[in-house]
Image (cartoon, rainbow, N blue to C red):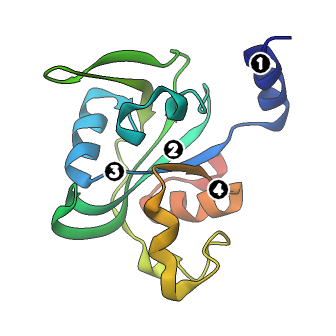
Amino acid sequence: MKKAATGSAKGAAAGPKHWIAVLPKSRVEVAVAAGFAVFAHGRHDAVKRTRSGDWLAYYSPRMKLHEGEEVRAFTAIGRFTDREPYETEMMAGRMGWRRDIAWERKAHEADVYPLLGQLSFIKDRQHWGLFFHRSIFSVPRDDFALIASAIGLDPKRL
C-alpha cells in the first residue's frame, strides 16, 4: 500500500486543509513575489504535508528572523498549485524544499490581536504566542475563514 495514494484519496474526500506557517515578513515578501511557499527552513518533511488545493496563511512575528521590528500579523494568503514540492537552492550552498502557491495579490496585512479571542486554536490568550512557535500547522476551516476575512479574502472562496 502506498502512503501517498492513500493520503491523497483521504485528502480529496475531506477537502482542502488550511495551514498557517510562521515566517518573518521580509521572507514572506520574497516568497510572494516569486510565487512559492517555504517553511521549517526548507525541510522536506514539512512541505510534503501540504497538497494541491490546500490553503496557506503566513503569520509573521517580526520583520526578520529573531530581529527587527515586531509585525505580529498575518502577512499573506494563498492556495497551493498542482506542482509537487521541489528542492532548490535557498541561498548560497543551502538546499531546501518549497512548493508553488497562487498568492492572493490583493490581500493586506492583518493584525493578529483582534482575532485572538475568536480563534479556536488559541486556548490561552495570555500565552497565545506559544502556538506560533511551530513552523507550520493546520487549523479548522472556520478559524482560517476568520483570518481570510481579516486579510481581505472572501471566506466563501475557501
From the image, tell me which residue sits under label 4.
139
Of callouts 3 and 4, which one flags the residue occurring earlier in the amino acid sequence?
Answer: 3
Q: Please report the residue visible at 43 percent of the width from the left and 15 percent of the height from the top.
A: 86
- From this viewpoint, which residue is outermost toward the top? 1
Q: Secondary structure at mark 3?
A: loop
Of callouts 3 and 2, which one flags the residue occurring earlier in the amino acid sequence?
Answer: 3
Marks 2 and 4, how far apart at CA: 10 Å
Give the residue type at disc 3. Answer: Leu
Q: Secondary structure at mark 1?
A: helix
Q: Position of residue 115 (x, y in %)?
A: 52, 76
In this view, the mark in front (3 or 2): 3
Give the residue type at disc 4. Answer: Val
Q: Secondary structure at mark 4?
A: loop
Q: Please report the residue visible at 22 percent of the width from the left and 54 percent of the height from the top.
A: 65
Of callouts 1 and 4, which one flags the residue occurring earlier in the amino acid sequence?
Answer: 1
Give the residue type at disc 2. Answer: Leu
In this view, the mark in front (2 or 1): 1
Q: Please report the residue visible at 83 percent of the width from the left and 20 percent of the height from the top.
A: 6
From the image, tell me which residue sits under label 2.
56
Pointer 3 and pointer 4: residues touching (CB < 8 Å)?
Answer: no
Q: Label for residue 23?
A: 3
